[in-house]
Image (tube, rainbow, N blue to C red):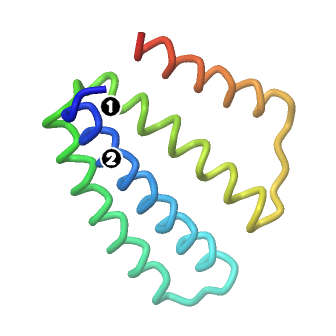
């Protein structure tokens, strides 16, 4: 894997992690109505967006957005299951599997 590819992946992963943290903040706000959490979530989204924008310097838009979206999906689903005790249907699980397959095919 080239340095450019690693840099792009690192920036995308940072954006995914920050967006997941922001999503947790928003979900906590929906449960507690603590308005500070909305501001925190927006601020973290903003920082994550900066990482996302920088990743586009090193990767094509189609590949970058596909990777970002599927990684974000996996992160948010895992957080939903672990932290918020949410459940997935069989169709949800199949959709996640197809998303993972799509990223693999784009990377070939």
Q: Secondary structure at mark 1?
A: helix
Crowding at mark 1 (Cα within 10 Å: few <14, some 14-19, many 20+): some
Of the 4 image quadrants, the one containing the N terminus is top left
Q: Is residue 58 left or right of residue 23?
A: left
Q: Is residue 46 left or right of residue 102?
A: left
Front position in the image: 20 or 32:
20
Residue at 27% over, 48% down? 52
Residue at 80% over, 27% down? 91
Front position in the image: 12 or 61:
12
Crowding at mark 2 (Cα within 10 Å: few <14, some 14-19, many 20+): some
Residue 10's label in the rendered image is: 2
Tally of marks: 2
Task: Point out residue 26 in the picture as x, y percentages from the top left corner.
Answer: 54, 71
Residue 64's label in the rendered image is: 1
Asked if residue 32 is positioned above or below residue 101 in the image, the reply reads: below
Task: Point out residue 67 in the picture as x, y percentages from the top left corner.
Answer: 43, 32
Residue 28's label in the rendered image is: none
Q: Are marks 1 and 2 in contact (CB under 8 Å)?
A: no
Q: Is residue 19 left or right of residue 100?
A: left
Q: To which quarter of the image does residue 66 belong?
A: top left
Q: Is residue 96 left or right of residue 3?
A: right
Asked if residue 16 is positioned above or below residue 82 in the image, the reply reads: above
Task: Point out residue 33 in the picture as x, y percentages from the top left corner.
Answer: 61, 86
Task: Point out residue 29 in the picture as x, y percentages from the top left corner.
Answer: 59, 79
Asked if residue 27 is positioned above or below residue 38 in the image, the reply reads: above
Residue at 51% over, 45% down? 72
Which circle's residue, 1 or 2, is located before the other in the chain?
Answer: 2
Q: CA distance from mark 1 to mark 2?
A: 11 Å
Give the foreground label among 1 and 2: 2
Q: To which quarter of the image does residue 56 belong?
A: top left
């Amino acid at each position: 894997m080239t340095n450019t590819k690693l840099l792009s992946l690192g920036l995308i992963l940072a954006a995914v992690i920050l967006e997941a943290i922001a999503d947790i903040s928003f979900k906590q706000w929906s449960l507690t109505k603590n308005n500070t959490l909305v501001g925190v979530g927006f601020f973290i989204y903003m920082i994550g967006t900066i990482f996302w924008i920088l990743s586009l310097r090193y990767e094509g838009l189609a590949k970058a957005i596909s990777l970002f979206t599927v990684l974000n999906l996996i992160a948010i689903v895992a957080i939903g299951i672990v932290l918020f005790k949410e459940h997935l249907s069989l169709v949800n699980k199949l959709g996640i599997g197809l998303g993972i397959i799509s990223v693999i095919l784009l990377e070939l």
